[in-house]
Image (cartoon, rainbow, N blue to C red):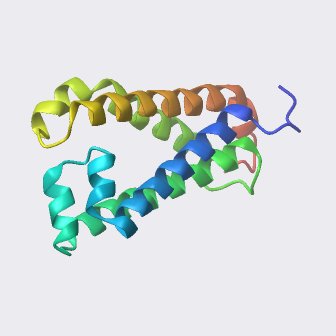
Amino acid sequence: MNSDENNKFLLAAALFCALAALSHVGCIVFGGDWYRFFGAGEPMAQMAEQGLWYPTIVTSGIVVILSIWSLYALSGAGAIKRLPLTRLALVAIASIFLFRGFSFVVLVPKFPENSLTFWLVSSAICVVIGSLFAVGAFQKWSELGRKNAF
């Protein structure tokens, strides 16, 4: 791959992470109906409607993580300045997304309030995003490992 080109897989991963972060912001802003629509479970929706802080804190944490991961994808793609430990971060992010995507069978009983639709859709999304990170990191591996890449 030409090192002057941006990596399309990592650009797509960045876009999907940013969209996921925005959808989580929507849950914070629009409350219970959004939590229900995205399948977060009735308890989270009710807590949000009651004005409790727990859904906002948890969802804000997810927004921050997804935003950072989007920046790392952009960094790995060459669209922004190289962030520290980009290569390690891309592998870790890909692994986390893929683990989350494939481990839903084990997670479902631990979170019975989440709908089956939530688990199937969110797991599929995680597998897609994780795959984008993995393929993109693989394609840029040698370039990301060069001196001054970290």
Residue 6 falls in image quadrant: top right
Residue at x-position 69% and y-position 41%: 11
> Left or right: 150 with respect to 53?
right
> Left or right: 112 with respect to 114?
left
> Left or right: 135 with respect to 30?
right
Query: 98 or 150, which is in the foreground?
Result: 98
Residue at x-position 56% and y-position 52%: 18
Query: 61 or 115, which is in the foreground?
Result: 115
Q: Position of residue 37 (x, y in %)?
A: 32, 47
Query: Where 115 falls versus 23 (above or below)?
Result: above
Query: Where 82 falls versus 141 (above or below)?
Result: below
Total residue callouts: 0
Query: Where 116 falls versus 39 (above or below)?
Result: above
Q: Position of residue 29 (x, y in %)?
A: 39, 69
Query: 28 or 91, which is in the foreground?
Result: 28
Query: Where 148 falls versus 28 (above or below)?
Result: above
Residue at x-position 68% and y-position 50%: 75
Residue at x-position 25% and y-position 48%: 40
Assign the N terminus to one quadrant of the image.
top right
Q: Position of residue 9 (x, y in %)?
A: 67, 32
